[in-house]
């Protein structure tokens, strides 16, 4: 059995459910379900707070989990990132009243409110800044208005939350985060876990790539392959038309229109792009 920790609440919950479903795992029926047993995939899914997931995985109670990179660092648990999952992207930044500070060096002796005390503490130590960390559970932005802190360090995605309370980010980003698959440091890979990783990687590739098909004159094939080299090398098949071949290759979704333009300029015809639903490379 693979024992897997999945966020039960917060910003990662929905996207984590989606990626697991696309990878063929049983979704939970409602948000109250705490454990889902998926015998077909020899997996048990435990729905836990994202903040606690690195702790369970670090202790070895659970084999793997999905959480934020920032939460993994913050926990200090002996768990490590295996695959970045491409969702839940955010930065972790300082903010305060506009113009109050310009960088971390201005925070010497100040009070900084955060719900990521571990991550912030390590950063301040690295920067050689001696400041007081005020640990709060959430809604950190309000700490300034209530006079508990001089600055905050918090998760920023669009910046809307900070703007709404009249705060402004300053200094370099403390960290960049996204959802990650984690496992215990040094834990032996078992075959079910390796299969799980391959499935997730398959979903990520299917999201990032499209399949491109086109016909091209045989004498231009080398130039065409330079444009669409594919993952392992493109498939080139004969076409029932003298002097022409058909090509099939995976290309990055981002920029596929420009690839089509380049192929068109080479004289390619019938250029088709289709979504990849799932893959295993
Ligand atoms: N608005 C957001 N956009 C993208 N990622 C986010 C956003 N808010 C939080 N995250 C990320 O989601 C992960 C989980 O944080 P989240 O705030 O959802 O947890 P939570 O359940 O609210 O826990 P807590 O109550 O401790 O804040 C973190 O890695 C964080 O960086
Ligand atoms: O830059 P934005 O797009 O506004 O997103 C960032 C906000 O989202 C999260 O809050 P959440 O809703 O998880 O509340 P919390 O502060 O209680 O954790 C995070 O803590 C920030 O406050
Ligand atoms: Mg939160």
Image (cartoon, rainbow, N blue to C red):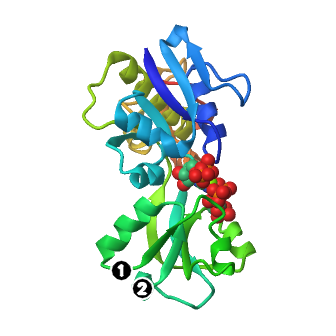
Between 19 and 242, the one lying in front of the other is 19
Q: Residue at x 65, y 71 (%)?
A: 141
Question: Looking at the picture, how far across and down is residue 162, in whole percent?
Answer: 67, 72
- Looking at the rendered structure, the secondary structure element under dot 2 is loop
Would you say residue 90 is visible in this rendering?
Answer: yes
Mark 1 or mark 2: which comes first in sequence? 2
Residue 267 to residue 213: above or below: below
Between 180 and 205, the one lying in front of the other is 180
Q: Residue at x 44, y 23 (%)?
A: 196
Q: Name the quadrant of the N terminus.
A: top left
Residue 201 to residue 107: above or below: above
Q: Name the quadrant of the C terminus.
A: top left
Question: Looking at the picture, how far across and down is residue 216, in whole percent?
Answer: 51, 34
- In the rendered structure, the answer to whether residue 277 lies left or right of residue 243 reads right
Q: Residue at x 51, y 88 (%)?
A: 101
Question: Looking at the picture, how far across and down is residue 76, in whole percent?
Answer: 36, 51
Looking at this rendering, what residue extends furthest in the top direction? 40
Quarter assignment of residue 126:
bottom left
Residue that carries the numbered disc 1 in the rendered image = 130
Residues tagged 1 and 2 counted as in contact (Cβ below 8 A): yes
Residue that carries the numbered disc 2 in the rendered image = 109
Q: CA distance from mark 1 to mark 2?
A: 6 Å
Residue 83 to residue 166: above or below: above
Quarter assignment of residue 82:
top left
């Amino acid at each position: 059995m693979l024992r897997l920790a999945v966020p039960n609440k917060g910003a990662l919950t929905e996207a984590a459910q989606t990626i697991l479903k696309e990878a063929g795992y049983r979704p939970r029926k409602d948000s109250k379900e705490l454990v889902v047993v998926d015998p077909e995939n020899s997996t048990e899914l435990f729905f836990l707070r994202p903040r606690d997931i690195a702790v369970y995985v670090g202790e070895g109670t659970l084999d793997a989990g999905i959480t934020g990179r920032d939460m993994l660092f913050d926990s200090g648990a002996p768990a490590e990132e295996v695959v970045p999952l491409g969702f839940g992207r955010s930065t972790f930044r300082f903010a305060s009243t506009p113009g109050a500070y310009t960088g971390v060096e201005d925070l010497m002796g100040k009070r900084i409110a955060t719900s990521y005390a571990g991550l912030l503490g390590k950063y301040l130590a690295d920067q050689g800044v001696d400041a007081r960390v005020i640990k709060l559970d959430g809604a950190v932005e309000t700490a300034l208005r209530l006079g508990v802190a001089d600055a905050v360090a918090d998760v920023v995605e669009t910046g809307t939350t900070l703007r709404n309370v009249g705060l402004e980010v300053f200094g370099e980003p403390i960290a960049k985060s996204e959802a990650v698959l984690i496992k215990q440091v040094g834990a032996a890979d078992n075959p079910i876990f390796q299969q799980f990783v391959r499935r997730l990687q398959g979903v990520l590739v299917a999201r990032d790539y499209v399949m491109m098909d086109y016909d091209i004159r045989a004498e231009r094939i080398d130039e065409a392959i330079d444009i669409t080299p594919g993952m392992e090398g493109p498939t080139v098949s004969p076409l029932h038309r003298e002097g022409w071949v058909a090509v099939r290759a995976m290309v990055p979704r981002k920029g596929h229109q420009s690839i089509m333009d380049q192929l068109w300029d080479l004289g390619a015809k019938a250029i088709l792009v289709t979504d990849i639903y799932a893959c295993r490379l």
